[in-house]
Image (tube, rainbow, N blue to C red):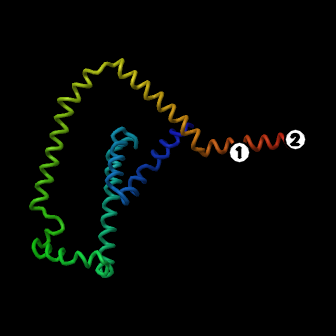
């Protein structure tokens, strides 16, 4: 089994657990990379739904843990120098905006909605009007040349990784060879 095959099998078998655990720690990058893998069907059938489920569970659990930690340690946090320095400003904002202090939905929500809608429309238009024409205009023979060059480069990288990283299977075979050579030396003596 090639080293990259081993890695693919490992990620395929335990990848969703990793998505869950890594979403607990850093959700943004984890979900971005998991979404790319899910788009290619890396996690099997219903790949996107699985990543969505495990990523959402990890993110929700992380947020709840952070909330409970803040609630549980609220008295000790009040003793931190940072909190004491920012307390007057926090109190002014709370007095001025009330419960909207946490998230000012009056302005921020509308701005974010406009940004998201414009981003989706822009992505759709770029894909539909520009990228799809480029794909149609592409020369299939040229694309095959690029694919062949990429496959050769990946093969070279695989060989390079195998040369620098001793995987378990390689270490095991090296140990067998070393034992066989020692036995041969012992038998010859």
- The residue under the point 17% across, 44% down is 119
Tag shown at residue 175? 1
Image spot of residue 150 (x, y percent): 43, 29
- The residue under the point 9% across, 61% down is 106
Image spot of residue 131 (x, y percent): 23, 30
Q: How many marks?
A: 2
In the picture of the structure, the residue carrying the numbered disc 2 is: 187
Identify which residue, 72 or 43, lies in the foreground.
Answer: 72
Q: CA distance from mark 1 to mark 2?
A: 18 Å
- The residue under the point 34% across, 54% down is 55
Label 1 packing within 10 angstroms: few (<14), some (14-19), many (20+): few
76 on left or right of 159:
left
Q: Indicate whether 143 appears above or below 78.
A: above
As helix, strand or loop, the secondary structure at mark 2 comes to helix
Q: Quadrant of the C terminus?
A: top right
Q: Choose the circle earlier in sequence order: 1 or 2.
A: 1
Identify which residue, 65 or 43, lies in the foreground.
Answer: 65
Q: Quadrant of the N terminus?
A: top right
Q: Indicate whether 16 appears above or below 90.
A: above
The image quadrant that residue 65 belongs to is bottom left
């Amino acid at each position: 089994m090639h080293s990259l095959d081993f890695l693919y099998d490992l990620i395929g078998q335990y990848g969703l657990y990793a998505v869950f655990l890594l979403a607990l720690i850093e959700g943004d990058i984890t979900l971005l990379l998991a979404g790319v893998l899910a788009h290619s069907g890396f996690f099997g059938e219903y790949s996107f739904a699985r990543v969505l489920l495990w990523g959402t569970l990890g993110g929700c659990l992380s947020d709840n843990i952070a909330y409970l930690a803040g609630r549980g340690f609220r008295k000790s946090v009040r003793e931190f120098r940072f909190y004491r320095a920012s307390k007057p400003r926090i109190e002014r904002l709370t007095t001025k905006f009330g419960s909207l202090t946490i998230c000012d939905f009056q302005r921020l929500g509308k701005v974010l909605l406009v940004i998201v809608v414009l981003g989706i429309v822009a992505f759709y238009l770029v894909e539909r009007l520009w990228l799809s024409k480029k794909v149609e205009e592409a020369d299939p023979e040229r694309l095959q040349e690029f694919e062949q060059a990429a496959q050769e480069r990946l093969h070279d990288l695989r060989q390079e990784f195998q040369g620098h990283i001793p995987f378990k299977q390689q270490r095991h075979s090296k140990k067998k060879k070393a034992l066989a050579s020692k036995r041969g030396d012992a038998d010859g003596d």
